[in-house]
Structure formats: structure tokens, C-alpha cells
Image: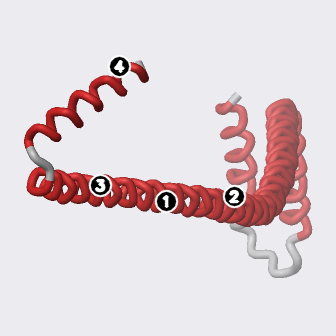
Amino acid sequence: MKTFLIISTLVPSLVFAADGAHGDHGVPWGLIGQQALNLSLLLILLTVLLRKKISQHFAERKVQYKQLIERAEEAKVAAEKSKREITERLQKLESNADNSIHKARSEAEELKKKIIAEAETLSARLEEEAKRTAEFELERAKLKLRNSLMEEAFKVARTNLESEVSSGEQQRLKAEFVDRIQVVQ
């Protein structure tokens, strides 16, 4: 087939070479006609020989372009979907951030009130306990002072009794004391 193509292009060249030796100086209509004939034969020959390949090539290109367009459309749809999802997530995050800040502030305020209430309760309890401790210590100090005063009074009374009362009378008082204690028991 390639040899046929080569021969069909070389044969008209030989014809033109043989014709150019005559010396005509007008419009070479015969030459133009031959070239037109050669061109049309060449085009017809190329069309017949390459029609299937050319149509197949353009059909493949058409399929490739359609596939590229489909992929581009799919990518566009996926990108738009991704953009919508990102926008929705961003809006949710922004609203959640506002809600979280508001919630954190309200929880902090509640915690503050709770801590203040607990501190007041503890303060009242500590104050009450301090009053009881002070009263207890006061009563203990009073008792200790009474005991101390009584011991001193007994010492003074004993000293006075020993110096003023004779030993016989002391014996009689001791016996009387023992008798009274036995009666009480």
C-alpha cells in the first residue's frame, strides 16, 4: 500500500518533467489541470485508504473528550459537595464555639455561687465551733479557778484548824466525819 502511494505521487512528477521542455509561455492550463487531477486522486486515495483510521481516531478522541468531561463534572460535583460539607462544619464549629463559651461561662458562674455558698456554710460552722470552744475553755478555766481557790481555802482552813484546834479535838472531829460518811453511804 505504501508503494502504491509512492508510485502515485511520483508518476505525475515524471509527466510534468516531460512536458516542461516545450517553451509555452501562457497560462499552463494543462499543467494546472494535471495537478488538480493529481491532487484529487491523492485526496480520494487518502480518503479511501485512511477513512477507517481517521474515523477511528476521531471516534477515540471523541470518547476521550467525553471521558475527560465526565471526570471534570464528577470532580466539580465532588468539589462542590466538599465545599458544602466544609461550610456546614465551619458553621457548626462557630455555633458550637459560641455555645461552648456561653455554657462555660454559665458553669463558671454556677461553680462560683456554689463555692461562695460552701465557704459561707463553712465559715458559719467554724464560727459556731469557735464559740463552743471558747465557752468550753471558759468553763474549764472557771472550774480550774474554783478548784484552785477551794484547795487554797482548804489549805488555809487546815492550817488554821491545826494551829487553833488541839489534837484531841482533831481526833473527835475525824471520828465524827467518818461516822457521817458511813451514814451517807
Q: Confirm or deny contact between disc 4 and disc 3 (CB under 8 A).
A: no
Q: Which residue carries the number 4 mark?
A: 182
Tell me, yes or no, whether the two marked residues, 4 and 1, touch with CB atoms within 8 Å.
no
Mark nearer the N terminus (4 vs 3): 3
Q: Which residue is mark 2?
A: 114
Secondary structure at badge 1 equals: helix
Q: Amino acid at mark 3?
A: Met
Q: Nearer the viewer, mark 4 or mark 3?
A: 4
The residue labelled by disc 3 is: 150
Question: Spatial distance from mark 3 to mark 2, Cα to Cα?
Answer: 53 Å
Q: What residue is pinned by disc 1?
A: 135
Tell which residue pokes out farthest to the bottom in this image. Answer: 25
Q: Nearer the viewer, mark 4 or mark 1?
A: 4
User: Of residues 30 and 83, which is closer to you in this image?
Assistant: 83
Q: Nearer the viewer, mark 3 or mark 2?
A: 3
Give whichever of discs 3 and 1 has the lower sequence position.
Answer: 1
Amino acid on which disc 2 is placed: Lys
Q: Nearer the viewer, residue 31 or 84?
A: 84
- Type of amino acid under label 4: Gln
